[in-house]
Image: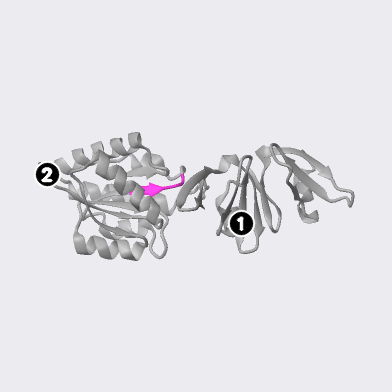
Amino acid sequence: MNHHRAVIADDEEILIQGLRIMLDRLWPELEICGEAQTGKEALALIEKTTPDIAFLDIKMPGLSGIQVAKKIYNTCKIVFITAYDHYAVEAFESEAVDYLLKPVTDSRLENTIARLKSHLKSKPDHSGLEIKMKKIIQVLENRDVPERLRLIKVKTGEELRFVPVSEVLFFKAEDKYSVVQTAQKEFLIKTPIKELEKELDPDQFWRVHRSSIVNIEKIKLIKRSFTNQMMIAFEHTDQTISVSRSCEHLFKQM
């Protein structure tokens, strides 16, 4: 039985442990020889331990998973991990790499493991691998479609949850945090409104005030307050969001 080794790199410790537990259960023969939470740590770890497989989060502090992959793709198999669903999926379907979409499911990980086992058994075509990997990295680096956030990572106590952005009613700045409001619950995250605006789909999420972004698909009605302030109301909550004068034009045609 071939003995293979892997490293896991993700900026969230709880996600590293979650993937390790899943791999222990679904591929017990695989040895996890190291973990990293930044791109620089991942690169140093891979160079030190020379694993057969590297599970790389695409978005990490310092070096991104893509930047790490550019340096090590000819030394081990690469599996990208991402919370974004737009990342040129057709590119990942080549035999050079695979990808895991957060939150990782058993079925998807089982497929990835099967592909990895098959590729590890075959004789590597270094020239073909280099061409494929360069193409994938080029697609990822020069993608025409900007990043669109699909899941929001929120912590509740010691647990990490993924909230689909489609369930969010609005985001609102509050002190040093941003409120993530769903129909059932309110969460706090440290990502500023300005950064969220860059990652959310602008066709669905509108910045209606310097401190708030709303999901237009969740709007129940738009009304005026007694001071003539435009206000947005949502289903399943009594909370409203005010619209700044400069943003009122967004709703003129609604």
Q: Tell me which numbered mark, 2 or 1, is placed earlier along the sequence.
A: 2
Amino acid type, callout 2: Asn
Q: Nearer the viewer, residue 251 or 232?
A: 232
**Magenta stretch: helix, strand or loop mostly:** strand
User: Mark 2 near mark 1, Cβ–Cβ under 8 Å?
Assistant: no
Name the quarter where the C terminus is drawn: top right
In the image, residue 253 lies at what x, y percent?
78, 40
Q: From the viewer's perspective, is 113 left or right of 252?
A: left
In the image, residue 50 lies at what x, y percent?
19, 58
Q: Nearer the viewer, residue 26 or 210?
A: 26
Residue at the top extreme, as displayed: 107
In the image, residue 127 lies at what x, y percent?
20, 50
Task: Tell me what residue is drawn at x 21 percent, y 64 percent.
Answer: 48
Where residue 204 sits, quadrant-wise, is top right
Q: Which residue is mark 1?
A: 178
Task: Tell me what residue is drawn at x 67 percent, y 38 percent.
Answer: 218
**Magenta span has 215?**
no
Task: Tell me what residue is drawn at x 20 percent, y 60 percent.
Answer: 49
**Element at badge 2?**
loop
**Is any part of residue 118 visible from this angle?**
yes
Residue at the left extreme, as displayed: 1
**Is any part of residue 138 visible from this angle?**
no
Q: From the viewer's perspective, is 165 left or right of 213?
A: left
Q: From the viewer's perspective, is 209 left or right of 114?
A: right
Q: How far apart are the alpha carbons under marks 2 and 1?
A: 48 Å
Which labelled disc corresponds to residue 252? none
Amino acid type, callout 1: Ser
Which labelled disc corresponds to residue 2? 2
Between tags 2 and 1, which lies in front? Answer: 1
Q: Which residues are magenta?
A: 80-84
In the image, residue 23 lies at what x, y percent?
27, 44
